[in-house]
Image (cartoon, helix red, strand yellow):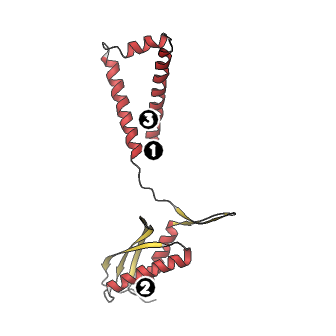
Amino acid sequence: MNPFDRFIFTVYSLFVTLLFILFSAVMLGWTAPWILLRDVFYPGRPEIFWPLMAVTILIGIRLFWVSIYRRQKRPLHVVLAENALGQVNLSLSAVEDLANKVAGRIQGVREVSSQMVEVPQGVGLKVQASVTPDINVPNASAEIQNMIKEKVFEITGLQVSSVEVHIQSISVTKPRVE
């Protein structure tokens, strides 16, 4: 929740709480709040009642929207193991870097970038790459998928359920041999 929403949540909560305290006091027989409430909600004074109700309703709608709308925040890490000494966490960017390195070592694959994605079966990777024109794209894509899945499991123990490969471009120039 951002600071603005926290502020209006605080104001709204205080307003509603104060209003219920006043109504409760009137229900218990205290007449002083009744005079205040009667003056504020008097039908002959719409300049107070309607703006107050409009603001209250708009704040309520805003808070309701914030409560049901959740931005997808990527977790920064995944717990690989937990034991008596503590947790072993793996950064998701480390898995992405590993996938980039593995895919970049495949003959004919260039400019690799990967991103962890959530899939129904667990975690997956979305890999975008450029390839040279002298390779078979379907074979290279299958090799990227297999190598990434195997190496990520071998090194991290994390089971990648899917590797989605997107070939962004076929480079005209071949990479330099160093």
Q: Residue drawn 51% across and 61% down?
A: 76
In this rendered view, identify the residue nearer to me: 177 or 165.
Answer: 165
User: Of marks 2 and 1, which one's residue comes earlier in the chain?
Assistant: 1
- The Cα atoms of the two marked residues, 3 and 2, are separated by 54 Å
- Mark 2, Cα crowd under 10 Å, few <14 / some 14-19 / many 20+, is some
- Residue kind at label 2, given as amino acid type: Ile
User: Of marks 3 and 2, which one's residue comes earlier in the chain?
Assistant: 3
Numbered marks: total: 3
| Image x and y of residue 110, in percent | 39, 80
Question: In the rendered view, does 159 fall on the left or right side of 119?
Answer: right
Q: Are marks 2 and 1 in contact (CB under 8 Å)?
A: no
Image disc number at residue 121: none
- The Cα atoms of the two marked residues, 2 and 1, are separated by 44 Å
User: Of marks 3 and 1, which one's residue comes earlier in the chain?
Assistant: 1
Image disc number at residue 8: 3
Image disc number at residue 106: 2
| Image x and y of residue 129, in percent | 37, 77
| Image x and y of residue 60, in percent | 38, 34
Is label 2 in a helix, a strand or a loop?
loop
Q: Is residue 173 visible?
A: no
Image disc number at residue 2: 1
